[in-house]
Image (spheres, rainbow, N blue to C red):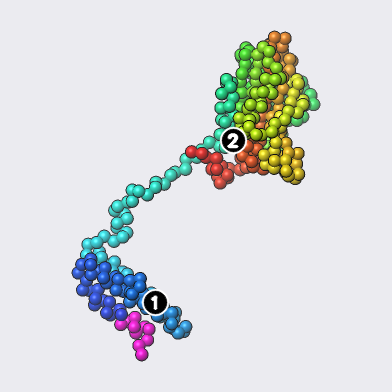
Amino acid sequence: MATFKDRIEGLKGEFETVADRVKDAKALEDLKNKYLGRKKGLVTGLFEELKSVPEAEKREDGRALNEFKQSVLMKVEAIGVRLGRPSPTDQISNHPDLTLPGRLRYVGAAHPLILFQEEIERIFLGMGYTIEEGPEIETDYYNFEALNFPPHHPARDSWDTLYITDDLLLRTHTSPVQIRVMEKKKPPILVINPGRVFRRETPDPTHLPMFLQVEGLVVDEGVTFAHLKGTLEYFIHALFGEKIKVRFRPSFFPFTEPSAEVDIECIVCEGQDKSCRVCGGTGWKEILGSGMVDPQVFKNVNIDPEKYSGWAFGLGIDRTAMLAIGIPEMRYFYENDLRFLRQFDLK
Ligand SMILES: [Zn+2]
């Protein structure tokens, strides 16, 4: 009885003879079907039979059969070329498929914090505020003294920063811009001042040595705490949605009197997680400080505190963005991990 190998050899000889007689595309198609057809092809049939070849010969026979199959494929291809039919590879290179989607080149996008800052700016621009900016390197006068922090005042401790000289420092808040604006403009004043600020902080989930802040200032005749409260409530609801819970808490700032800190409910745990690292289990997170402008600050910029009153606020953009997005770490914003950053690329 003929061995499996003999059968391959026999089929090989027969194939060569038949293949040489192929004269047109139809015959080529028939040849292909006869040997490689999915169901009744002769080579295909041998692969079926290979399954019952004794284990000891299977390896050797399998290799011989694969070689034969390759030679059949190459011959069919060669006949196709001889008959003038372009090979599949030629078809692709000569006729690109114009219906394929193009390859987009990633050109980058605005950082999520900048997108968030713009969102805040839009809300205030809609209320008639204008945007003013100031220098990141400030003098002690603008950063502290004009804002009612005399030298050696204990409140300076919580605003500690990096000093360039005794008098020049990296600003600890955007509040110096308030002073600069009031020196230039006369009331009514309605501005917000976004920008980068610096503190001597050890980084943790909600503190960073460098972050973004936005400051707001309103000065006019007859401005009251009710304006402060109404505006900030409107702003927070515009930013976080109507349902967010807000609370005002008495606080102290040297440049406002009375002062209030504003908390929103913790979006990360919704007050349900006693071990939440964002709110410390309290269910609330402070997002901004605010208050009525201290009369002494008005005197420092020659605005009459008997005639005018005003209110101001300062909000940490990073921390607020963290809560708005619902992430537990402010540091994600600065790690430059594209997997994180690209989620906010809304182009
Ligand atoms: Zn929480």
Q: Nearer the viewer, residue 186 or 180?
A: 186
**Which amino acid type corresponds to the residue marked 2 in the rendered image?**
Leu
| Quarter where residue 310 is shown | top right
**Residue 169, percent across and down?**
68, 27
**What is the quadrant of residue 34 in the picture?**
bottom left
How far apart marks 1 and 2 lie (CA) works out to 62 Å
Q: Residue at x 52, y 40 (%)?
A: 345
Place residue 280 in its image quadrant: top right
Q: Residue 113 shows which numbered tag?
A: 2
* Residue 21 shows in the view: yes
Q: Which residue is mark 1?
A: 47
Q: Is residue 148 above or below residue 104?
A: above
Are the residues flagged by discs 1 and 2 in contact, CB closer than 8 Å?
Answer: no
The residue tagged with tag 1: helix, strand or loop?
A: helix
Query: Dot 1 surroundings within 10 Å: few (below 14), some, or many (20 or more)?
Result: some
Between residues 272 and 340, which one lies in front from this camera angle? 272
**Amino acid type indicated by mark 1:** Phe
In magenta, the rendered stretch is 1-10
| Disc 2 secondary structure class | helix
Residue in the picture at 72% in, 30% down: 247
* Quadrant location, the N terminus: bottom left
Judge whether residue 66 is colored magenta: no
